[in-house]
Image: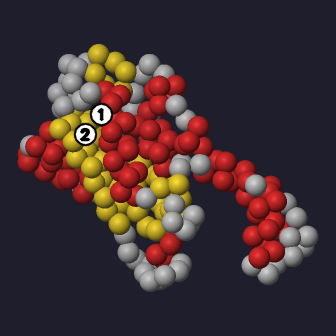
Amino acid sequence: MEDLIEGIIKQIGEDPHREGLLKTPSRVKKAYEFLTSGYKADLDSLVNGAIFEENTTGMVLVRDVEMYSLCEHHLLPFYGRAHVAYIPNKKIIGISKIPRIVDVFARRLQVQERLTDQIAQAIQETLDPLGVGVVIKAKHLCMMMRGVEKQNSELFTSSLLGLFKSDPTTRSEFLDLIRTGSH
């Protein structure tokens, strides 16, 4: 990968042997390894048994989970916040696992629409809850820095499963909760 990065530096008209660029190929390689680490992640290992029997029936919501990903069309970042909720079906998950599940899928080359669905499906498959709701609000540098150059545009995506899709009251409660005080 370092040779390829050096080639890109040359192709854009820079000198890869200039002092400030000498270690850039190595740094970029490490950055991409981190930013795409979701491909190597294993959900079962990540959850690590942190599923607990509980008879609660109220909505569980982790709101404003910071997320960073790479647009698969331009390899430019998009970033924002994910809101993830579920209605337990006699099982709950350790709350720190939800942001980690978001990261597993965000740390891949992505489109926001698929990312939203993958998070919802992972929660569904892991817990078999009565419903799952995921909303992501993000800014895309591919829209901000190039192309249409619209710096204030945000993309909202949602994935609603089970009660979040079939029950208007559950859906409304979820949407009200993520709107209240959200960034």
Query: Element under label 1?
Result: helix
Q: Name the residue rendered at 27%, 49% in the picture.
A: 159
Q: Name the residue rendered at 26%, 27% in the picture.
A: 128
- Quarter of the picture containing the C terminus is bottom left
Q: Tell me where residue 7 sits by quadrant.
A: bottom right
Residue 175 at x, y percent in the picture: 20, 53
Relative to residue 80, is residue 56 drawn left or right?
left
Query: To which residue does mark 2 refer?
Result: 132
- Which color scheme does this rendered protein use? secondary structure
Q: State if disc 1 and disc 2 touch (CB < 8 Å).
A: yes
- The alpha-carbon separation of the residues under discs 2 and 1 comes to 7 Å
Residue 30 visible to the viewer: yes
Q: Name the residue rendered at 51%, 71% in the picture.
A: 141
Query: Element under label 2?
Result: strand
Residue 153 at x, y percent in the picture: 38, 75
Q: Residues within 10 Å of mark 2 (few under 14, many from 20)?
A: many
Relative to residue 36, is residue 67 drawn left or right?
left
Relative to residue 173, is residue 17 drawn left or right?
right
Residue 59 visible to the viewer: no
Disc number for residue 124:
1
Q: Name the residue rendered at 81%, 65% in the picture.
A: 6
Closer to the camera in the image, 118 or 131: 118
Q: Tell me where residue 152 sits by quadrant.
A: bottom left
Count of all numbered marks drawn on residues in the image: 2
Tell me the kind of residue under disc 1.
Answer: Gln
The disc, 2 or 1, on the residue closer to the chain's N-terminal end is 1
